């Protein structure tokens, strides 16, 4: 099905020490396909994965490029460790582009088979530039060295249908289906700015296609703007050493040690193999960290209805190995099988729902005031198949619901949808509207930053209130953690380069509960180390979860248990064993910082990435409303007494809210100063030439951006 | 009065580690307890008695999310 528009034959490069040494470039405007050499410079400065993505992206765009400019690229890379099968979490694909939500580089990552199969097909990275005239599919046959671009007007859009069809089409038979992986989005991606990418893998036990998502920042929107319906890769012949590692014995040894920990400890620790990341929902609520009703509070008595045990006992299939790449014993990609849909175009069908992940239960559940596991799973399914980033969706709808309840918008604006907290059917209808590009759902797909402007300018809403309660920074919606009481995490979100996603730093326990980082300098050190360390996963193609969602039983004896030193050493050992390099744990941080600072300068180059862009909405820092203050009255009154020397008994509620706000906003300013100093930035948030030189990144292209701003 | 993670916390006679964890709603699984610098194994939580003035550290071992 579909006319072939272009064919390109190539000789798949042999992978040596984790790198094929080649990257693939496709321009859809003129159907040009080229091979590029991955240089030693790229490996030294950018390592791989997200580093390669950002390097190629920098060279493709100008400061004037926007998400839908033809020259914007989608770049993906798996990293030098990607695809090894001896350790957990080694199948991540890193994707970068200029985001429609933020206008700066976004990076997002996903499991699934696409990235490793792409590398084993001979490509360390894959750039897609330009725009096709009609819907197309790009197919990469890694065994036969063939790339095809073909018309795809007749293929469906929604991922669960499209990926199933393509997997069957490109596989020779049932056994061959595991060798095919599809990247796709869905019908809502072309009508919203929060489209995601689904990365497929075929599950032979369930005989169905499963998905992991590179969800953040609108990558699916860009995919559809380029008129790409799907990317398909096929590679048959996965064996344990396709990376041709320099020292396979060490990888095996480290892997065996790790898998034993997983076997012995997971059931006593996070139960990742039973429930996946959603294991923390009740814990987050008990620690006042579960975002509830647009981050107003940190938990709710009703959360027991969506507790992990509910999903384990009533919804999620147990006892199957749910890894999203070979060799992962964490196997946390849980799913609800034979789930009966009750709304939308697929109502009445039984489907497999991938998830729910923690972000799904927290975002589509608690943050919308929806404490109904069935409704959460249905929202989960439709977000995925329609190609909607559920984090941006959930945080946006939470904002809309609060605006509705505070009468900033009404049914006249929403087309009659009663978008109040707890109304699951209204949320689902909004999602269906988004997929059809209709009504208020289409508007919601613009995300919070644009909605604030529309609500104020066209609907007459209160601008100050909306600035306070709209949970976005840089244009990206917050991930699903309540964090008002952790100054470090306020910075962890708002100072994150791409926007408030928690993959840079999650410091709430260290800061709020353990009180391990009391000073600004302590917090700044944490906001240096953890973002740098966690960046590294994205450079090499690894999943972060195996690092600290299981820890060695004697981890507590170490001097810095939060860092999980044994697992850090595992990563050092594996990196050296695959690549033949000789790095230590400090070199690992250096590799990361080179890319981290590069991305910050990239943001500056695109017009963001300065101090003005690092401010959170006040709801991130403290209580906006009387109800929020009263929900933690004892704590806030104590802080007024202890930190400001005030007597709350003699103050009105409005005075207390105002005084606390002044204090907390000042604390955040001081945190920014400390973090900027620690990261080697000016007080305006610009990396200094001196710091760039120290880490070997004083490249002329970067200095040209930062020097005028010193 | 005792210290829990550097902050004052009311002490009562017979308070065990388990009592303290329950009172503080410290339900996270990855925690370790040190009292006056000495590690308290999990199997001792039920009967290990905290004394008035003790310095209790309850470390939640995750920087994840």
Image: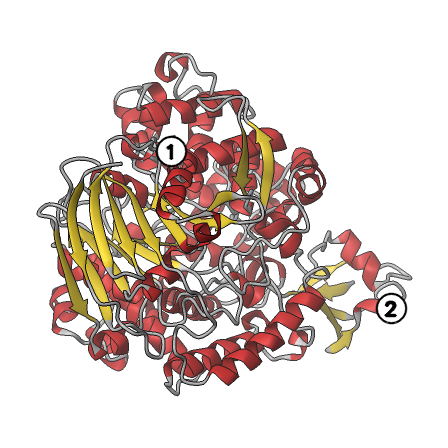
* Residue topped by disc 1: A158
Q: Chain of mark 2?
A: B
Instruction: Write the residue at 49% across / 70% down.
Output: A522
Q: Chain of mark 1?
A: A
Left or right position of A700 against A102: left
Rendering coords of residue A222 (x, y %)? 25, 42
Which quadrant does the N terminus of chain A fall into?
Answer: top left
Where residue A497 sits, quadrant-wise, is bottom left
Using the numbered discs, state the Cα–Cα distance from disc 2 to disc 1 in whole angstroms. 57 Å
Q: Position of residue A690 (x, y in %)?
A: 22, 78
Q: Is residue A140 above or below residue A207?
A: below
> Residue at the location (30% across, 48% down)?
A231
Residue with the most extreme bottom position: A582
Q: Which residue bears the numbered disc 2?
A: B48
* Numbered badge on residue A427: none
Q: Judge from the rendering whether residue A307 lies leftward or rightward of residue A619; answer left or right.
A: right
Secondary structure found at label 1? loop
In the rendered structure, the answer to whether residue A369 lies left or right of residue A301 reads left
In the shown orientation, is residue A185 left or right of residue A294?
A: left
Instruction: Tell me, yes or no, if residue A601 can be seen here.
Output: no
Tell me: residue A488, above or below residue A593. Answer: above
For image coordinates 16% across by 74% down, the residue present is A699
- The part of the image, by quadrant, that contains residue A648 is top right
Assess disc 2: are there few (<14), some (14-19) or many (≥20) residues with their C-alpha within 10 Å of its C-alpha: some
Question: In this view of the protein, which residue sits in the foreground, A453 or A104?
Answer: A104
């Amino acid at each position: 099905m579909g006319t072939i528009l272009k064919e390109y034959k190539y000789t798949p490069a042999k992978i040596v020490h984790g790198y094929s040494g080649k990257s693939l470039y496709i321009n859809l405007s003129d159907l040009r396909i080229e091979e590029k050499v991955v240089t030693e410079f790229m490996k030294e400065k950018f390592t791989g994965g997200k580093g390669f993505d950002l390097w190629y992206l920098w060279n493709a765009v100008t400061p004037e490029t926007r998400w839908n400019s033809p020259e914007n690229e989608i770049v993906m890379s798996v990293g030098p460790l990607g695809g090894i099968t001896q350790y957990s979490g080694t199948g991540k694909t890193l994707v970068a582009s200029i985001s429609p939500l933020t206008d700066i580089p976004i990076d997002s990552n996903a499991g699934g088979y696409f990235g490793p199969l792409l590398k084993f097909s001979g490509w360390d990275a894959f750039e897609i530039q330009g725009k096709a005239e009609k819907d197309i599919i790009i197919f990469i046959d890694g065994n036969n060295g063939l790339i095809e671009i073909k018309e795809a007007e007749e293929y469906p859009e929604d991922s669960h249908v499209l990926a199933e069809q393509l997997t069957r089409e490109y596989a020779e038979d049932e056994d061959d289906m595991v060798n095919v992986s599809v990247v796709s989005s869905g019908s809502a991606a072309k009508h919203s700015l929060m489209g995601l990418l689904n990365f497929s893998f075929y599950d032979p036990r369930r005989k169905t296609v499963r998905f992991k998502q590179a969800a953040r920042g609108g990558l699916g929107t860009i995919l559809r703007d380029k008129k790409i319906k799907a990317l398909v890769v096929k590679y048959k012949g996965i064996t344990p050493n396709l990376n041709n590692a320099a020292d396979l014995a060490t990888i095996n040894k480290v892997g065996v040690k790790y898998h034993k920990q997983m076997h012995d400890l997971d059931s006593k620790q996070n139960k990742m193999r039973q429930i996946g990341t959603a294991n923390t929902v009740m814990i987050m609520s008990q620690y006042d960290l579960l975002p509830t009703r647009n981050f107003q509070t940190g938990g709710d008595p009703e959360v027991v209805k969506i507790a992990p045990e509910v999903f384990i006992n009533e919804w999620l299939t147990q006892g199957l190995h749910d890894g999203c790449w070979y060799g992962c014993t964490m196997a946390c990609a849980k799913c609800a099988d034979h789930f009966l849909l009750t709304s939308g175009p697929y109502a009445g069908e039984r489907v497999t729902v991938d998830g729910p992940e923690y972000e799904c239960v927290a975002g589509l559940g608690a943050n919308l005031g929806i404490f109904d596991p069935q409704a959460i799973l249905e929202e989960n399914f439709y977000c995925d198949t329609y190609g909607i980033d559920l984090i941006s969706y959930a945080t946006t709808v939470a904002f809309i619901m609060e605006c509705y309840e505070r009468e900033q918008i009404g049914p006249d604006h929403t087309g009659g949808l009663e978008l109040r907290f707890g109304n699951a059917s209204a949320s689902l209808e909004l999602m269906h509207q988004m997929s059809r590009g209709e009504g208020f759902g289409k508007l919601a797909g613009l995300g919070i930053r644009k909605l604030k402007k529309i609500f104020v300018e066209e609907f007459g809403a209160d601008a100050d209130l909306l600035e306070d309660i709209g949970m976005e920074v840089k244009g990206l919606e917050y991930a699903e953690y309540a964090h008002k009481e952790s100054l470090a995490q306020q910075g962890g979100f708002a100072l994150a380069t791409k926007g408030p996603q928690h993959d840079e730093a999650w410091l709430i326990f260290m800061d709020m509960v353990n009180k391990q980082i009391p000073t600004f300098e302590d917090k700044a050190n944490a906001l240096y180390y953890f973002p740098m360390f966690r960046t590294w996963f994205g450079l090499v193609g690894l999943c972060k979860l195996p690092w600290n969602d299981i820890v060695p039983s004697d981890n507590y004896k170490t001097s810095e248990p939060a860092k999980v030193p044994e697992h850090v050493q595992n990563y050092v050992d594996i990196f050296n064993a695959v690549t033949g390099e000789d790095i230590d744990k400090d070199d690992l941080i250096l590799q990361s910082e080179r890319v981290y600072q590069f991305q910050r300068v990239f943001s500056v180059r695109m017009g963001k990435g300065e101090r003005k862009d690092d401010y959170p909405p006040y709801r991130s820092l403290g209580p906006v409303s009387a109800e929020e203050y009263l929900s933690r009255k004892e704590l806030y009154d104590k802080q007024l007494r202890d930190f400001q020397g005030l007597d709350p008994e003699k103050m009105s509620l409005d005075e207390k809210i105002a005084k606390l706000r002044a204090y907390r906003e000042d604390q955040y300013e001081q945190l920014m100063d400390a973090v900027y100093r620690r990261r080697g930035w000016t007080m305006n948030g610009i990396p200094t030439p001196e710091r760039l030189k120290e880490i070997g990144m004083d490249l002329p292209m970067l200095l040209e951006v930062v020097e005028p701003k010193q | 009065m005792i210290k829990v993670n550097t902050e004052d916390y009311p002490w009562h006679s017979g308070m065990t580690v388990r009592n303290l964890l329950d009172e503080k709603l410290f339900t996270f699984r990855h925690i370790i307890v040190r009292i006056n610098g000495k590690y308290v194994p999990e199997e001792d939580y039920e009967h290990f008695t905290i004394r008035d003035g003790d310095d209790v550290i309850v470390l939640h071992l995750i920087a994840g999310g």
